[in-house]
Amino acid sequence: MSVPLLDVNAQNHPLSCELEAAFQRVLRSGQFIMGPDISAFEQECAPFTGSTSNLGVSSGTDAILLALMALDIGPGDEVLVPAFTFFATAGCVTRVGATPVFCDVCPICFNIDPVHAATLITGKTKAIIPVHLFGQMADMDAIMALAAQHHLFVIEDAAQAFGATYKEKPAGSIGHFGCYSFFPSKNLGALGDAGLLSTNDPALAEKARMLRVHGMEPKYYHQAVGGNFRLDTLQAAFLRVKLLHYPAYTAARQANAASYTAALSQLPGVQAADPRDCKCLPNQEARHAGLPEAASLILPVAYPHNGHIWNQYTLRVPGPGRRDALRAYLQGVGIGCEIYYPLTLDQQPCYQSLPLRADLPVAHRLAAEVLSLPVYPELKPEQQQEILAALQSMP
């Protein structure tokens, strides 16, 4: 049995009637730009973002870009970003003329290492962007303390973490801005590009709203140079339909992740990641930076203080070439899997000319070891059993 990495049709097709009704509602209204579904969706997102202001935007990338613009970050400024994440985080920094400074990450939770980030701060540092990678939040207490000490802005890249929590605080609600993506493959996926920007600062919200429409306030009077970052009314209408099902989607992902961990933990040579190795676990001194080389697979963990939403279930496969061999094997037997991400940001061709501020050993190791398995909500038990059987017989 072939098992895809993700099956968007398995989620969207059962909602066909509701999605078609939403389409007809928008079609009949004729309000395709900034229609009433935009403000309704923004309000309905509040329980998941924990923020007083939510702005529908054109993509998760544009949410980051808009946040940087609203904070007046530009040429001459430096922004701390994790080296191990999707390109958009650093790409947006470059697009506003600032310089991304790449930080190492935690070997267990994959998120930015606040201790390493602190060593990279200079007089030019203006902001830090923690990425809540794979659905688990970064150590926001340490990040906010570091930001307060050095007067930095904090932009939470929660593209993969809509609805995740840190000590019961929603992703995106702790920093100055929260940025979310509703790309079709995300936990809450639109039927095209879509995103959200959140903040609890009324002044920043007002400025971001203006910049979202070319810096215009009032109509045809441009107070600043902004952009066209509007969310389509149609995508907002579709997302409103799916938002009603989102708690069930999250619960199913969490159940699938728990099933993987329970089954795989029984295999010889498989170990769960040890929280004592995580620099981001509150009140816990890191035991050491490495992990047992003898492990054939290292399973991801969700910390008790975090509400992990499992955008990805990401294994580590230690040993030179073993990850790529496992990926080829799984794909050969029809099991979908993917490497998020094969290159760190400092290794990207477009950043080769950027001086590297410090070594990034953990990030580089993760890029050589990680492999993500299907964990989407509609994954059937028999499909997961097929995946587990393949892993049990892996060479």
Image (cartoon, rainbow, N blue to C red):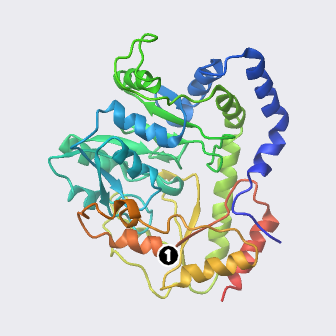
Instruction: Give how far across and how far down residue 153 sits, in percent.
Output: 29, 39
Q: Position of residue 234 (x, y in %)?
A: 68, 28
Above or below 184: residue 304: below
Viewer-side residue, 218 vs 120: 218
Q: Is residue 222 visible?
A: yes
- In this rendering, the answer to whether 308 lies above or below 26 is below
Residue under the image location 62 percent in, 80 percent down: 326
Can residue 296 be seen here? The reply is no
Looking at the image, which is closer to me, 310 or 344? 344
Position of residue 92 relative to residue 254, above or below, is above
Q: Quadrant of the C terminus?
A: bottom right
Which residue, given by chain and number where applicable, does mark 1 sit on? 369
Residue drawn at x 75%, y 59% as measured from the top left: 379
Q: Quadrant of residue 362?
A: bottom left
Q: Secondary structure at mark 1?
A: helix
Q: Residues within 10 Å of mark 1 (few under 14, many from 20)?
A: many
Q: Residue at x 69, y 77 (%)?
A: 330
